[in-house]
Amino acid sequence: MRAIAELERDLARRRAEGLERERRIVESPQGARIRVGERTLLAFASNDYLGLANAPALIAAARDAALRWGVGAGASHLIVGHAAAHAALEDELAAFVAPCAGARALTFSSGYLANLAILTALASRRDAIFADRLNHACLTDGALLSRASFIRYRHADPAHVEHALAASDARQKLIVTDAVFSMDGDIAPLPDLLRLADAHDAWLVVDDAHGFGVLGAGRGTLAHFGIESERIVYMGTLGKAAGVAGAFVAAHPSVIETLVQSARSYIYTTAAPPLLAETVRAALAAIRDGAERRARLTELIAAFRQASGEWPWNLLPSATPIQPIVIGDVPTTCAVADALLARGIFVPAIRPPTVPAGTARLRVSLSAAHSPADVETLVAALRETAKGRA
């Protein structure tokens, strides 16, 4: 069959270029160490930044919630799938993140669905979306699905945003950005972007997938900068630092009600199980009281960065748990990742098209579940691997 033959040629080409993706079967809970097949690996790959994914308090909350609510929501939120657990979680999230006075929140099954909801509900053909060039793929997909004009600006460059906004005569304008960039670990200049949103009567859509729970005493990147506004539409995920699953949008009540009434990725999907909502409520309590976890994480980040001169590759500037080591070409990056794996350390090799050509990298993800000795082990392995390739 010709169609299958074409698919097989494309897959073979991807394999030959070292761009084939692979699923590893993990046979243990998430943690500093995971079991893959017969091996236990020291892992620096998870987004479980606070080490909550296997926390006893969350496991107990999930168990108790399953006994109360069962394991499925049964329907969409707008039919009979919206449980009291969802409503309570939304109230708590809105009050915790507080992007503006009187904000409401809306929960989703994933950050991807949440971002599709925001952009397709708030923008259409007569509008314009101004997006950071390094935004996550789901923001790009949401912008394309909205059918609005799609203008990409230079990474973290407010001057470029300002020029693009001034040149636009769109009805509605949306500035859209990751808060913490998932492959670089740097933080968007949100105060500058909010200033531009005010000046040009635009929305500021903030994807804080990697900042919620970590920055701003856990409240996220808005709190980190001390900003709030009715113009901000905030998306946070619940499967990274919160350790569970799902996502939420927090914004002015009129924005949230618009999503309820018109966002297709909210209306036409089954609600996440109530047991997950109850588990996230336990995670939110752990985040509120998580100063010790965040302090430990900050210490690990500092220790890792202090050692970065011990290898020849480029460690990008990042004060977040995402510590990218840019190596450059795909074969060398994969070889370094394989060398670490041979030492029992798993650090994922990130390749194009996830990152631009020529910037393949190791994406080191640190967690409060790691110990200082774990970081020392990684640093020593990177040093020895670099010497072996010199």
Image: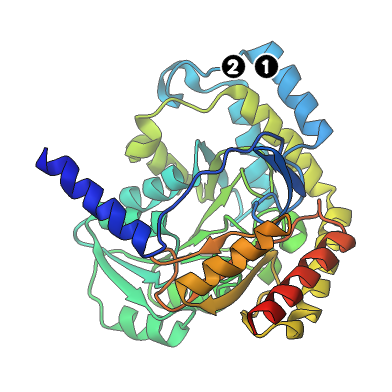
Q: Nearer the viewer, residue 101 or 190?
A: 190
Q: Is residue 199 above or below residue 43?
A: below
Tell me residue 26's x, y (percent). 63, 38
Residue at disc 1, secondary structure: helix
Q: Residues within 10 Å of mark 1 (few under 14, many from 20)?
A: some
Closest to the observer, 15 or 61: 15
Residue at the (64%, 23%) spot, across then down: 275
What amino acid does circle 1 point to? Ala
Q: Is residue 276 left or right of residue 132?
A: right
**Mark 2 or 1, nearer chain start:** 1
To which residue does mark 2 refer? Answer: 71
Say which element carries label 2.
loop
Instruction: Identify the residue at image location x=40%, y=54%.
Output: 138
Observer able to see residue 346: no
Query: 269 or 345, which is in the foreground?
Result: 345
Q: Residue at x 59, y 28 (%)?
A: 86
Residue type, mark 2 in image: Val
| Residue hosting label 1 | 66
Question: Whole-percent x and y of residue 80?
Answer: 46, 16
Q: Position of residue 293 (x, y in %)?
A: 84, 54
Quarter holding the C terminus is: bottom right
Image vertical order of residue 61 relative to residue 15, above or below: above
